[in-house]
C-alpha cells in the first residue's frame, strides 16, 4: 500500500467501518483525470462501505474531495466488487399468498372456512331541525351583539 496522505486517509476511514480490516486493500494510480483510488474489501463488508443507497460511499467521496481541495488534487474512489457472489435476496410479500404451479400439493389438505356474515349496519338518516334562513341570521347577529358588549 502507498503511504500517501490520501491512501492513509481512506485506509483509516474504511478500516474503522469494516469487520475485517485486514482485507482492506487500496491501489493508487495517477492518470490525466487525477488520482484514482481503487478500494477492495471483504465481500461481507462491501455493504458497510457502500451503505444504504450508497450514502456511506458518497460520504467517503465527499471527504476525499475535501482532501483534494486542500492538496490541489482531483480524487476518484472506485469501490471494487470482487466478484464473489453474495447471497440472493429473497422477497416474499407478507400479505399475499404465493401460489406455485410446480409445487406438489398432494399431501396438503385444503380447508374451507366460512365466517359468519354480518349484515351491514343500516344508518337511519337523522333529520336536522329545519331553521329558517332568517332565523339563522338573527341568531348569529344576536351572538355577535353579545360579544360586542363584552369589555375586553
Image: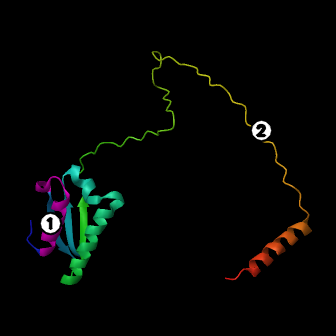
Q: Quadrant of the N terminus?
A: bottom left
At mark 1, the secondary structure is helix
In the rendered image, which residue does mark 2 sit on? 122
At numbered mark 2, what does the secondary structure look like: helix, strand or loop? loop
The magenta stretch is 5-23
Structural crowding at the residue carrying mark 2, measured as other residues with C-alpha within 10 Å and reported as few (<14), some (14–19) or many (≥20) = few
Q: Which mark is residue 132?
A: none
Q: Mark 1 against mark 2, which lies toward the viewer?
A: 2
Splitting the image into 4 quarters, where does residue 71 fall? bottom left
Mark 1 and mark 2 in contact? Answer it, CB < 8 Å: no
Of 61 and 76, which appears nearest the observer?
61
- Quarter of the picture containing the C terminus is bottom right
Viewer-side residue, 17 vs 141 = 141
Classify mark 1: residues with Cα within 10 Å, few (<14), some (14-19) or many (20+).
Answer: few
Q: Is residue 114 left or right of residue 57?
A: right
**Would you say residue 11 is visible in this rendering?**
yes
Residue found at x 18% / y 65%: 13
Identify the residue at image location x=62%, y=22%.
114
Give the vertical position of 91 relative to 82 (above or below): above
Mark before the other along the chain sequence, 1 or 2: 1
Report whether residue 32 is seen: no
Q: CA distance from mark 1 to mark 2?
A: 70 Å
Left or right placement of residue 115 versus residue 36 in this view: right
Q: Position of residue 136 (x, y in %)?
A: 86, 67
Q: Nearer the viewer, residue 23 or 80?
A: 23
Prevailing secondary structure class for the magenta stretch in the rendered image? helix
- Would residue 55 be found to the left or right of residue 80 on screen? right
The residue pinned by badge 1 equals 12
Amino acid at each position: 500500500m502507498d503511504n500517501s496522505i490520501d491512501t492513509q486517509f481512506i485506509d483509516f476511514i474504511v478500516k474503522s467501518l469494516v469487520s475485517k480490516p485486514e482485507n482492506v486493500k487500496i491501489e493508487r494510480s495517477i492518470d490525466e483525470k487525477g488520482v484514482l483510488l481503487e478500494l477492495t474489501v471483504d465481500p461481507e463488508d462491501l455493504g458497510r462501505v457502500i451503505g444504504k443507497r450508497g450514502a456511506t460511499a458518497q460520504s467517503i467521496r465527499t471527504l476525499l474531495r475535501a482532501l483534494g481541495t486542500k492538496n490541489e488534487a482531483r480524487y476518484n474512489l472506485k469501490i471494487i466488487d470482487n466478484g464473489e457472489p453474495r447471497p440472493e435476496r429473497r422477497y416474499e410479500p407478507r400479505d399475499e399468498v404465493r401460489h406455485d404451479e410446480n409445487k406438489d400439493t398432494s399431501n396438503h389438505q385444503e380447508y374451507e372456512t366460512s365466517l359468519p356474515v354480518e349484515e351491514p349496519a343500516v344508518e337511519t338518516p337523522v333529520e336536522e331541525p329545519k331553521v329558517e334562513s332568517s332565523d339563522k341570521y338573527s341568531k348569529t347577529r344576536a351572538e355577535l351583539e353579545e360579544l360586542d358588549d363584552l369589555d375586553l
